[in-house]
Amino acid sequence: MDGRVREERSLGELFGDLTDDVRMLLRQEVALARTEVSDKVAHLSRDGMRIGVGGVLAFVGFQALVATAIIALDLIIPLWLSALLVGAVLAIVGYVLIRQGMNDVKRRGITPTETISSLKEDREWLQDQVR
């Protein structure tokens, strides 16, 4: 013997350690999934709010444009021009807000991609450990 102490562990101890490691890994994955989903929900709620506000502004703009048409047909005076400008500005702002919100929702999506990727890596690691 060369003086080094060799520690040998039983197969049961090794599987016990593997089981503990897998449990810890699964707990960490669940925590990651919770964090990622709550982050996505926060962004979706903000985007939803933007879409809602944009929709309201677009609707108000539409109402102003309708009022403009009525005024323009009834009274041919400068009042219709001011209503037209207000209606057009509100409609444009509403449209921009709706497009931004929709683009953000499409870009982010709701799939927890980091968690899925991490789970795939964990599966590969576990398969290597069992082999």
Image (cartoon, grey):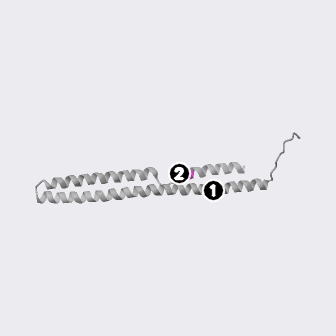
Q: Find residue 116 and report its horizontal and vertical position in percent.
A: 56, 52
- Secondary structure under tag 2 reads helix
- First in sequence, mark 1 or 2: give its number: 1
Residue 63 percent across, percent down from the top left: 23, 60
- Judged from this view, the residue extending furthest toward the top is 2
Question: Residue drawn at (70%, 56%), measured in percent from left and top?
Answer: 20
Region rendered in magenta: 112-116
Observer-nearest of 65 and 128: 65
**What residue did someone put label 2 on?**
113
- The one of 106 and 87 positioned closer to us in this rendering: 87
Q: Is residue 99 magenta?
A: no
**For the residues marked 1 and 2, what is the alpha-carbon distance in whole angstroms?**
16 Å
- Which residue: 20% across, 59% down? 66
- What secondary structure do most residues of the magenta stretch adopt? helix
The furthest residue to the left: 76
Label 1 sits on residue: 26
Amino acid type at circle 2 is: Thr
Residue 96, image x, y percentages: 32, 51
